[in-house]
Image (cartoon, rainbow, N blue to C red):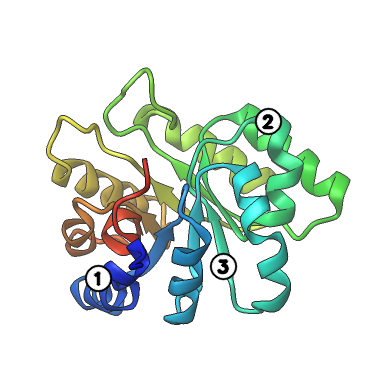
Amino acid sequence: MTSDTDKHDISEARNRIIAEIGDDTVLVAASKRQPADRINAALKSGHRVFGENRVQEAQERWATRRESISDLELRLIGPLQTNKAEDAVQLFDVIETLDREKMLRALIKAVEKTASPPPGLLIQVNTGNEPQKGGVTVQGLEELLSQARETWPGEILGLMCIPPAEEPAGPHFALLKKLADQYALPQISMGMSSDYALAARLGATHVRVGTALFGARDS
């Protein structure tokens, strides 16, 4: 019997995506709800940078694997609840979705309580001003960034965005790049399976790709 992993060559997909985005952009494998065989296939292909949407799912998937993979990099790319801050700082190397002062305070407290090395932080910017979506407004970015730079014990690495689904992504990517340059932030996380190549052309340092890498998720 042929599995979905056999039908969809993850190593081949990875090589194709990397060729499209070039050497200056990092492929973050968005592994939300992916089965173990696909994760293992990605690891076998040499991939080491993974993005997770939920803390609990990430713990279940990576707690054991992390012990044997020294060069693994885990990035939280989904929303974070303050009650998961302690788990997050102990598991992730980078948290991409800081979007409010309350979360910043919770993360600082979690690092102090757990004595964990502070993960790098990206601030999520709500470039489309969508009320249902996480992210600080463009107008509120400067204040949150200033607070983070003054109080966070680790590095403030960059910015992240998820453009509105019904709008062209290009202007949002261009805006995020402009903001990152304005505030001298080195990392720009933007672009997913449908638009990662465009994001790379417009300055993304990291693209978060799920379906294009792993194949369609099981329903």
Name the residue nearer the viewer: 209 or 99.
209
Q: Is residue 31 visible?
A: yes
- Disc 3 residue type (three-letter): Glu
Q: Residue at x 60, y 46 (%)?
A: 57
Q: Quadrant of residue 125?
A: top left
- Disc 1 residue type (three-letter): Ile
Q: Residue at x 86, y 54 (%)?
A: 115
Q: Position of residue 85 (x, y in %)?
A: 71, 39
Residue denoted by label 2: 82
Decide which of tag 3 and tag 2 comes sooner along the chain: 3
- Disc 2 residue type (three-letter): Thr
Name the residue nearer the viewer: 215 or 219.
219
Mark 2 is surrounded, within 10 Å at the Cα level, by few (under 14), some (14 to 19) or many (20 or more) other residues, namely some
- Image quadrant where one finds the C terminus: top left
Residue denoted by label 3: 73
Decide which of tag 2 and tag 1 comes sooner along the chain: 1
Q: Position of residue 122 (x, y in %)?
A: 50, 49
Q: Position of residue 154 (x, y in %)?
A: 67, 57
Decide which of tag 3 and tag 1 comes sooner along the chain: 1
Q: Secondary structure at mark 1?
A: helix
33 up-or-down from 201: above or below: above
- Image quadrant where one finds the N terminus: bottom left
Q: Residue at x 33, y 68 (%)?
A: 2
Q: Marks 3 and 1: CB-CB under 8 Å?
A: no
Q: Is residue 153 visible?
A: no
Residue denoted by label 1: 17
How many numbered dots are placed on residues in this image? 3
